[in-house]
Amino acid sequence: MARSDRRATTTPARPEDERLPLGATFGYGFQHVLTMYGGIIAPPLIVGGAAGLTAAEIGTLVAASLFVGGLATILQTVGIRFFGSQLPLVQGVSFAGVSTMVAIVGGGGGIPAILGAVIVASAVGFLITPFFAQIIRFFPPVVTGVVITTIGLTLMPVAANWAMGGAEDAPDYGSVGNVGLAFGTFAIVILLSKVGSGAVSRLSILIAIVAGTLISIPLGMADFAGVGDGPIFAFPTPLAFGAPTFEAAAIVSMLIVILVTLTETTADIIAVGEIVDTKVDRKRIANGLRADMASSFVSPFFGSFTQSAFAQNVGLVAITGIKSRFVVSAGGLILVVLGLLPVLGRVVAAVPTPVLGGAGVVLFGSVAASGIRTLAKVDYANSMNLVIVAASISFGMIPIAKPDFYDQFPTWFATIFHSGISSAALMAILLNILFNHIKAGTPENPSVFAKGTGRTAVGDDDLADLADDGVLNRSVGRVAAPAAESDTPAADAERPR
């Protein structure tokens, strides 16, 4: 009896406060790092490549992203007064800002303009966190789904460019060898996803990158000569890319990214709260968002970008059932250590771009697929939501399909709208307000866009008719019911960033 009482007194009041043995804590924490590693290194690789940085400079970006991501994770999970949700959430550079940052670089601002935009936009995001509960109603699934889908689609040209070799002026750009290596890496991802165990499947992208790199070495397509150029261990140099610069158009574009990031983090906090089975209230959400924005504000001073919760790690919590926030804190500590090893960043930067391209096709495509899954939850009946989705995604694809579309416009305008994410987000937000918040003038049964959006499923009886005599004998009383849509928050929790 006494033994049972003693066990009861050691049981934490909240599931997320459970403490595991030290070995298990760091073991599970390392699993979190492996799950999100491919996602956290992709943004600095993309942005660094777009900015024309050297491999060593890209390595510095990667190291800074790991270091700041680790600190942000510790702040979010351990928490201090007013900062941190104290939930098992891994933080890292968000995919949401990648296309916008590439557009800022394309506008001539370079890395300093990105860092300045992140600083100002994060400060604004920090100030509005107490009021975000009122603002979030303007970011329903019809808006966030459009944005997430557009993020994935706008990144596909990056994957294609990587697959071809990365440098258009290189003699082997687009060669069969480059594309073949990319396809081989892609095939490894698919194969591991099919035949691997659950753990192998979740790490398929990371394993495929390693395997593709090993394949490239005997083919003479990998160059690791520069890996040794620089220190093995070093603290990230503050303002290594120069003092931030502040451009109005870049700041406006990044502010849109911050609003989307706040929305996604709110959804992740709610989702992981449900998975852990713990109380999540407005105060806890605000604390989590403040940690997000504080980390994003500090991040540029170390050479990194906006920080956000990684949704694939929320899915990992659901899969493993390990709810302890201290496990994720251990993962944050591992990220900090990795960030203090710039040699690892140089190794990552030396991975052949076709290998990254093959993995990127799946990685970026999964982002788009997650957005489509979110859009599947939208109610299209007797509403203009289909118009919102159609117009917004199309508007966001214009600068992707025709990159010089806004070249004759003022620089500030082109910087904002050359980002497919900014274009799609602005259109989705404005149309959502017009059709779903301003009801005046909207008819009860809006237009042809609201009609015919539901599909009648083909039932077993219909298939039997077609197999029997090739004639569909559908009677009035035998109409198949429409397919049910998934509405599980757990599915949304696995959305990658």
Image: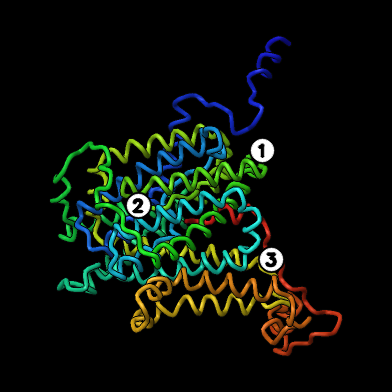
Provide residue 303's location: percent of width, then percent of height. Answer: 31, 49
Which residue corresponds to mark 3? Answer: 485
Residue displayed at 50% across by 39% down: 76
Secondary structure category for the residue under label 2:
helix
Provide residue 443's location: percent of width, then percent of height. Answer: 76, 83
Which residue corresponds to mark 2? Answer: 41
Identify the image quadrant of the N terminus: top right
Q: Alpha carbon of mark 3 to alpha carbon of mark 1: how far?
A: 27 Å
Provide residue 398's location: percent of width, then percent of height. Answer: 44, 80
Q: Alpha carbon of mark 1 to alpha carbon of mark 2: how far?
A: 31 Å
Secondary structure category for the residue under label 1:
loop
Instruction: Report whether residue 142 is seen.
Output: yes
Q: Tag on residue 220?
A: none
Provide residue 205's location: percent of width, then percent of height. Answer: 39, 55
Which residue corresponds to mark 1? Answer: 278
Query: Mark 1 is on which residue type?
Result: Thr
Residue displayed at 43% across by 74% down: 417
Given residues 440 and 292, the one toward you in this image is 440
Specify how the rendered protein is coloured: rainbow
Query: Mark 3 is on which residue type?
Result: Glu
Q: Nearer the viewer, mark 3 or mark 1?
A: 1
